[in-house]
Image (cartoon, rainbow, N blue to C red):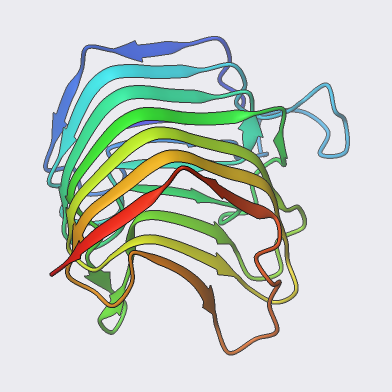
């Protein structure tokens, strides 16, 4: 697929069809290794990038879309289909990225048959927001807007907070879950470690219908 990494800035991927990748179809990964001093705000990781008017289908491992840290990145007007092992999109602090700063925007996306099973049949959602084990920074400032989830393989939306990390200022607005084959349209998940309480997540005008 395509991986924005190590401080990619002001770039655009558009009008692109990606199918059958062995990892994330399109990822924005703010890995810190090549982006300057870790404590310097002048080095925000991947910043102000846009992914638009794309179609991602059938990754045989990992997600159709993923965002790991960074500043003011946008994914819009995308169709994501048939992620059999992971999510349609994963927004996460996994891999110890630069912090989420500014606003990360995920909007006008259709997720069709996304969110399968991996790691001992663990079910993932079509949308998965995850603050990873021992992450140094919260998953923060994420706006999901005008999204349709259709026939999710497992759950519609899954939010996971691990080991006293936090998820802050995450908003779902006009998100519709139309059919899911798991137990939940929306699941705020608690693992075996102490977790946050989900108070940093807001849902506005969202609908869930049609179990599998």
Q: Quadrant of the C terminus?
A: bottom left
Q: Tell me: residue 199, above or below residue 163.
A: above
Q: Report whether residue 208 is seen.
A: yes
Pick the front one: 176 or 72:
176
Q: Report whether residue 6 is seen.
A: no
Tell me which residue sits at (52%, 17%) in the image.
49
Q: Tell me: residue 85, above or below residue 7.
A: below
Q: Position of residue 80 (x, y in %)?
A: 21, 38
Q: Quadrant of the N terminus?
A: top left
Numbered marks: total: 0
Q: Quadrant of residue 107?
A: top left
Q: Position of residue 69 (x, y in %)?
A: 62, 40
Q: Is residue 50 left or right of residue 109?
A: right
Q: Tell me: residue 153, above or below residue 74.
A: below
Q: Position of residue 128 (x, y in %)?
A: 43, 56
Tell me which residue sits at (16%, 60%) in the image.
84
Q: Is residue 125 left or right of residue 10?
A: left
Q: Position of residue 19 (x, y in %)?
A: 12, 36
């Amino acid at each position: 697929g395509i991986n924005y990494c190590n401080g990619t800035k002001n770039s655009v991927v558009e009008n692109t069809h990606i199918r059958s990748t062995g990892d994330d179809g399109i990822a924005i990964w703010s890995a810190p290794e090549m982006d300057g001093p870790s404590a310097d705000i002048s080095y925000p990781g991947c910043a102000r990038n846009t992914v638009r008017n794309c179609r991602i289908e059938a990754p045989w491992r990992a997600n159709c879309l993923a965002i790991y840290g960074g500043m003011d990145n946008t994914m819009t007007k995308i169709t994501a289909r048939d992620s059999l092992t992971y999510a349609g999109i994963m927004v996460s602090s996994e891999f110890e990225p630069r912090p989420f700063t500014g606003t990360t925007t995920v909007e006008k996306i259709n997720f069709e048959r996304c969110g399968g099973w991996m790691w001992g049949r663990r079910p993932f959602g079509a949308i998965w927001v995850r603050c990873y084990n021992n992450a140094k920074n919260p998953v923060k400032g994420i706006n999901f807007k005008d999204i349709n989830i259709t026939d999710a393989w497992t759950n519609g939306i899954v939010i996971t907070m691990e080991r006293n990390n936090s998820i802050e200022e995450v908003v779902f607005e006009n998100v519709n879950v139309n059919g899911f084959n798991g137990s939940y349209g929306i699941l705020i998940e608690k693992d075996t470690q102490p977790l946050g309480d989900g108070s940093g997540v807001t849902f506005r005008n969202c609908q869930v219908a049609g179990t599998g």
